[in-house]
């Protein structure tokens, strides 16, 4: 056993100051970006060969994060093993990033994607960048892509709007209230609380009225005719269950009462291989010289 | 403030978060003139990453560090950001946790944290599977572990559904369950729910009092006996349990059975109006309050530090 204290830059790049006291494990590096006065947690997955392309992974909504995490990490490792560097992160106020959830909005989380994209561009300036989002991350990544960031956009299970993301979570809260047998408020009354300027608690997070308001954001897929940059949206079905988050967890509990629970760590071979092939086909990796 | 930590233990790279305490002093000091406050090592809840559901563990880390206790949260092998393999299915994973397979990593981690962070004592903490690992690891780690915080420890073995001799019985049970759920969930179910509680709650209490002399057949005996040994050895323990809110089969009261009369340093608290993960209702706030109060009683801060804040407001 040994504590790894030696930080060294991945593949010849120079690490920024925020890495100074981090340890480095071959291929994976966790750390924080200083962003908006908070610590934005990220993990960088680098291939064991020169980085020819990067993917920025924007994860799902907070309450879906715990259940999809294993598959999300597996996807990042799969990309790195296939020669594409991947960076994943936690939005401010969620998971390993600092900040108060109650103060967060969809717009602030969109800025988190911006910050990570800038960081990648700074340290891997020659690597083409694929933006990849899951659930809420797909919605936010689309917005960022529309602002000219990224060379390709891959979406898994994009919602029609931010409201759809929150409505899913509200539905889960109501279901849990029913099962607990507590006096429950209806969906409309919970939304009424938010509209009246009061916070509500959903799956361990305090939602603020401004979060609800910011979720009005609709999904605006790039116009294929106008966009020169490739994009693709993939709907996920039940075979991708852990990736579709707590929706999956709810199904798990139902299935558990009727037999064998579904796998929590499936290989997702078809989804991963198909997505990787699309990224490789659509990123201009070939123009990069191998050092 | 948070920092990322990484330890290589038994060929697995374990990634964790260190919540730097408000005082921030004497962290790496080997020969502190005063006894340093213990560090709290939080373990994964089941297969969830180290922040846990609703980020409860992450918030616990921030809160306790603000009060003055350093907190470490680590992902066990294969979980969260740590390296290592995981099975595809939940059942073998749960069974491996219940057999204590994470305990050697947790115990070694406690030893390393003890060594690197000023020889401070370590309190192992976890929810559900994390509590199970903490019990096993406390037995392995020895003197540097000086307390346990166990949230919803599960002393029953997780077993896949075993086929019954009579397939019809299973079908009837499933129908009964779905009918109950439907009645409880349907609009206007208030009357049914009230009736259910009026009838079932006293019956559950009767069953609870009757269960006295024998452990259930599905008890995880190695775990139960380890826990009893630690309790009787006087290891301070805080046990937090979610009050049984959901109408359902009565739970066996393992703690009452195992505790006996020789475990006076075990504090057991039931938190009402919450769930297994302590995220619903007022669970989060109550968990933070009870843990802070327990720490102040059993492991008072000796450094001259003003706590940054006390129990969080609701």
Image (cartoon, coloured by chain):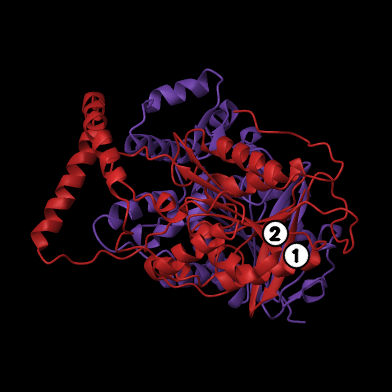
Quick one: which chain is red? Answer: B
Q: Chain of mark 1?
A: B
- Look at the image and tell me in which quarter the C terminus of chain B lies: top right
Residue B292 higher or lower than A271, as above or below: above
**Horizontal and vertical percent position of residue B236:** 62, 52
Q: Mark number for residue A130?
A: none
Q: Residue furthest top?
A: A196
Q: Residue at position x 78%, y 76% from top?
A: A11
Disc 1 is placed on an element classified as helix
Q: Nearer the viewer, residue B26 or A279?
A: B26
Q: Is residue A224 visible?
A: no
Q: Nearer the viewer, residue A149 or A188?
A: A188
Q: Chain of mark 2?
A: B
Q: Mark number for residue B122?
A: 2
Disc 2 is placed on an element classified as strand
Side of B30 relative to B126 (left or right): right
**Horizontal and vertical percent position of residue A244:** 43, 54
Quick one: which chain is purple? Answer: A
Q: Quarter of the image holding residue A260?
A: bottom left
Q: Label 1: how many residues lie within 10 Å, few (<14), some (14-19) or many (20+)?
A: some
């Amino acid at each position: 056993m040994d504590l790894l204290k030696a930080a060294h830059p991945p593949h010849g790049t120079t690490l920024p100051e925020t890495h100074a006291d981090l340890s480095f494990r071959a291929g994976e590096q966790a750390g924080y970006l200083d962003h908006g006065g908070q610590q934005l947690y990220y993990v960088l997955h680098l291939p064991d060969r020169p980085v020819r392309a990067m993917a920025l992974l924007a994860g799902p909504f907070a309450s879906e994060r715990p259940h999809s995490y294993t598959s999300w990490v597996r996807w990042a490792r799969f990309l790195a093993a296939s020669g594409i560097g991947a960076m994943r992160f936690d939005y401010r106020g969620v998971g390993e990033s600092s900040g108060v959830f109650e103060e967060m909005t969809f717009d602030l989380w969109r800025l988190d994607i911006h910050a990570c994209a800038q960081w990648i561009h700074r340290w891997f300036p020659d690597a083409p960048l694929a933006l990849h989002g899951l659930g809420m991350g797909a919605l936010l990544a689309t917005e960022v892509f529309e602002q000219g960031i990224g060379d390709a956009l891959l979406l898994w299970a994009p919602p029609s709007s931010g409201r759809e993301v929150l409505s899913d979570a509200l539905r889960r809260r109501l279901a849990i209230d029913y099962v607990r047998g507590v006096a429950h408020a209806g969906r409309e009354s919970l939304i009424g609380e938010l509209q009246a300027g009061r916070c509500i608690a959903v799956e361990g997070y305090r939602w603020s009225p401004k979060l609800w308001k910011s979720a009005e954001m609709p999904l605006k897929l790039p116009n294929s005719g106008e966009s020169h940059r490739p994009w693709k949206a993939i709907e996920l079905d039940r075979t991708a269950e852990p990736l579709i988050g707590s929706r999956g967890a709810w199904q798990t509990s139902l299935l558990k009462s009727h037999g064998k629970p579904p796998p929590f760590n499936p290989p997702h071979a078809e989804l991963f291989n198909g997505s990787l092939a699309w990224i490789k086909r659509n990123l201009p990796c070939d123009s990069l010289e191998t050092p | 403030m948070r920092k990322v930590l990484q330890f290589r233990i038994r060929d697995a790279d374990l990634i964790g978060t260190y919540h730097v305490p408000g005082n921030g002093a004497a962290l790496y000091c080997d020969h502190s003139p005063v006894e340093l406050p213990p560090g709290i090592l939080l373990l994964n809840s089941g297969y969830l990453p180290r922040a846990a559901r609703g980020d409860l563990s992450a918030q616990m880390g921030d809160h306790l560090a603000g009060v003055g206790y350093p907190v470490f949260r680590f992902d066990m092998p294969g979980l969260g950001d740590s390296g290592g393999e995981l099975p595809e299915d939940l059942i073998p994973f749960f069974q491996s946790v219940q057999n204590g397979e994470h305990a050697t990593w947790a115990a070694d981690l406690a030893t390393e944290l003890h060594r690197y962070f000023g020889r401070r004592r370590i309190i192992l903490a976890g929810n559900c599977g994390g509590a199970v690992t903490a019990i096993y690891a406390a037995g392995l780690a020895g003197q540097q572990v000086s307390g346990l915080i166990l949230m919803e420890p599960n002393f029953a073995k997780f077993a896949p559904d075993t086929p019954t001799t009579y397939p019809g019985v299973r079908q009837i049970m499933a129908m009964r369950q779905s009918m109950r759920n439907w009645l409880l969930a349907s609009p206007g179910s208030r009357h049914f729910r009230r009736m259910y509680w009026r009838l079932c709650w006293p019956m559950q209490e009767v069953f609870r009092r009757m269960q006295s002399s024998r452990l259930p057949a599905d008890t995880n005996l190695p775990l139960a006996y380890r826990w009893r040994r630690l309790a009787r050895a006087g290891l301070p323990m805080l046990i937090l349990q979610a009050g049984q809110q959901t109408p359902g089969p009565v739970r066996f009261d393992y703690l009452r059975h195992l505790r006996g009369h020789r475990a006076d340093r075990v504090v057991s608290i039931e938190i009402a109006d919450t769930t297994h993960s302590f995220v619903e209702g007022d669970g989060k706030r109550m968990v933070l309050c009870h843990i802070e109060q327990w720490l102040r009683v059993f492991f008072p801060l000796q450094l001259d530090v003003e706590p940054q804040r006390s129990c969080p407001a609701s």
